[in-house]
Every structure is written in structure tokens, then in C-alpha cells.
Image (cartoon, helix red, strand yellow):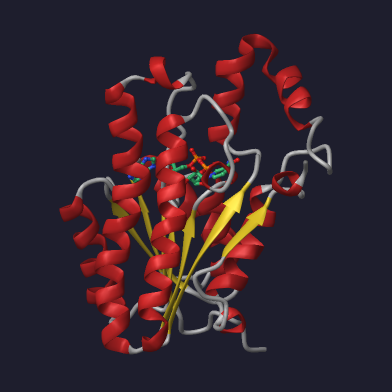
Amino acid sequence: MSKRFDDKVVIITGAGSGLGRASAVQIAKEGAKLTLVDLNTGSLEETRQFVLEAAPEAEVLLVTADVSDEEAVKNYVNETVKKYSKIDGFYNNAGIEGKQNPTADYGSNEFHKVVRINLDGVFYGLKYVLEVMKNQGYGAIVNTASVGGIRGVGNQSGYAASKHGVVGLTRNSGIEYGQYGISIKAIAPGAIMTPMVEASLKQMGGDHWEEAGKEFVSVNPMKRFGKPEEVAHLVAFLLSDEAGFINAAVIPIDGGQSYKY
Ligand code: NAD
């Protein structure tokens, strides 16, 4: 039976953990050839193992790169084209949360660090992938924004600025590139239980972080954290041909929390 990503090439950044890893597994199961990008080489190797367990035939290229380094981004795009000759899908996902503090105490260095990775990194990815996709005349891109990119959350100056920026880039670039057969969308996840969220709960709750987690989701309409696999299904749909007319849109996946008054 044919699969949605048969013969398709997909790049995923932040593929060593969380949402990137779960999406790599899902999209590989659906037939894709992958380029997996992360800062952490060891965790990329682990993701490759998960991918091959789920999809033994999958072709996987690993590229260690810091997405805030423009040359490194250019390199992962070039390596992909060298190996596979095209890019069908791009999950522009790598990001960090940064430390939690009110604005005056947030720290300028922390602010710049978070913006460099979460916003510059997404911009560089768009810049080099769009060059390839425009020449091909097709492609789909999903950027990972956040509920923190569409609502005020608090204690997250760098994260809020960068993720609102990702939403802006998505809308702007989607308008520009739709005419070339390219769709660009963003997802806005709420709290999904990944190592990033675990680290953040530990910063808030210390040894009692699991209790802090329960309290954190008590205001969610669904009273739970999201699962990385739920996000992976959304990402796979958005990168597939089925979602080709969804463009410049920002799609929350948060149990409804961002709509709550
Ligand atoms: P995670 O920490 O589990 O995974 C992030 C991955 O990105 C890690 O493997 C890390 O090594 C990699 N990474 C970090 N900095 C990098 C850099 N400079 N260059 C290359 N790779 C880098 O986090 P996650 O929860 O899977 O988050 C993935 C994305 O989803 C992030 O952009 C995050 O902001 C966003 N997000 C997550 C949640 C959530 O609840 N988990 C909610 C909203 C948005």
C-alpha cells in the first residue's frame, strides 16, 4: 500500500528529542527519507535507532548543526540536496525555552541567546530551504511556534519575542511563497510532555516537579499534558500533500487552553 511520504524527503531540526524525534519516527513510518538535524550528535544517533525500529527501510542522514549558525544551516540544506536531490518537507523545529524570569530580571544575554536559536535559526532554515523549494516549484514547511507565540504567558521575554517572531515569519513568508507551490505553516503547541517541559517544571517545582506538573495542567480544559506523538501526527498531516492548501496559518495544539477566557 502506498504511503503519504513515499519518495519524499523531509528535513527535521531539533530531531534529537521531544517533538522533533516523535515527528521523525512518524514521518519515517509513512515512507519518508529523512535528514535529522540537532546540536547533540548522541541524541541524533538515538533518534536514528528509534526511526529504524519503527521503519527499518528508512533512509536517514544525520547532520550535527547549531541552527543559530547560518553556515551550519546552509550546510544541512546542502548535504540534504547532495544526498537526495530535493526537499519535499521541512520541519523547522529546534528551539529552547530559556530561563524563566520577569522582564527586568530576564537578562540581556539570555534574551539574545533565546532569540538567536528560536528566531534566527528558523529564519536561516527558511532562507536556505526556500531557495531550493522555489527552484523545484513545490514544498511544505512547518515552523514550531508555541502558545507563547500567540498569547502572553509570563516570565518568558525571550521565548515570547522569538515565538511571536516565528508566527510573523510564517505569515509573511507564506504570503510570499504560496505562488510557487510552497505552503508554510506554524504549529502552536501548549504544554507537551517532552524533556524541555520536564526541565521547566524542575525549575519551577524542584523535587516536587511532578506535583507542579499536575497543578500546571489543572487549568487546561483537558487536564493533561499533550503527547509528542499527538504533535507528530499534526506535523505529518501539515507536511503531507493533504494539507497543501493550508498556508500562512498558525495551528494551536493545546487542548483548547489558548481559547479559554
Ligand atoms: P526538547 O528540548 O525535547 O528538544 C529540542 C531539541 O532541539 C533538542 O534535541 C536540542 O538538542 C535541540 N536544539 C536545541 N538548541 C539547538 C540548536 N541551537 N541547534 C540545533 N538543535 C538544537 O524540546 P521540545 O519540547 O521537543 O521542543 C521542540 C520545539 O517545540 C521547540 O521549538 C519548542 O520551543 C517548541 N515547543 C515545545 C512545547 C512543549 O510543551 N514541549 C510547547 C510549545 C513549543
Residue 153 coordinates in the image, percent (x, y) = 59, 33
Q: Quadrant of residue 118?
A: top left
Q: Quadrant of the N terminus?
A: bottom right
Residue visible at 32% across and 80% down in the picture:
133
Considering depth in this image, is 8 or 206 the residue closer to the camera? 206
- Residue extending farthest top: 207
Q: Quadrant of residue 4?
A: bottom right
Residue 57 vs 208, above or below: the answer is below
Q: Is residue 84 left or right of residue 257?
A: left
**Count of numbered marks:** 0
Does the rendering let one see residue 55? no
Q: Quadrant of the C terminus?
A: top right
- Residue extending farthest left: 71
Residue 105 coordinates in the image, percent (x, y) = 40, 14
Residue visible at 41% across and 75% down in the picture:
175
Considering depth in this image, is 186 or 42 the residue closer to the camera? 186
Considering depth in this image, is 154 or 189 the residue closer to the camera? 154
Q: Quadrant of residue 109?
A: top left
Residue 135 vs 52, above or below: the answer is below
Residue visible at 60% across and 74% down in the picture:
30
Q: Is residue 115 left or right of residue 34?
A: left
Residue 59 coordinates in the image, percent (x, y) = 42, 70
Residue 245 coordinates in the image, percent (x, y) = 56, 83
Residue visible at 58% across and 52% down in the picture:
188
Residue 90 vs 114, above or below: the answer is below
Does the rendering let one see residue 83? yes
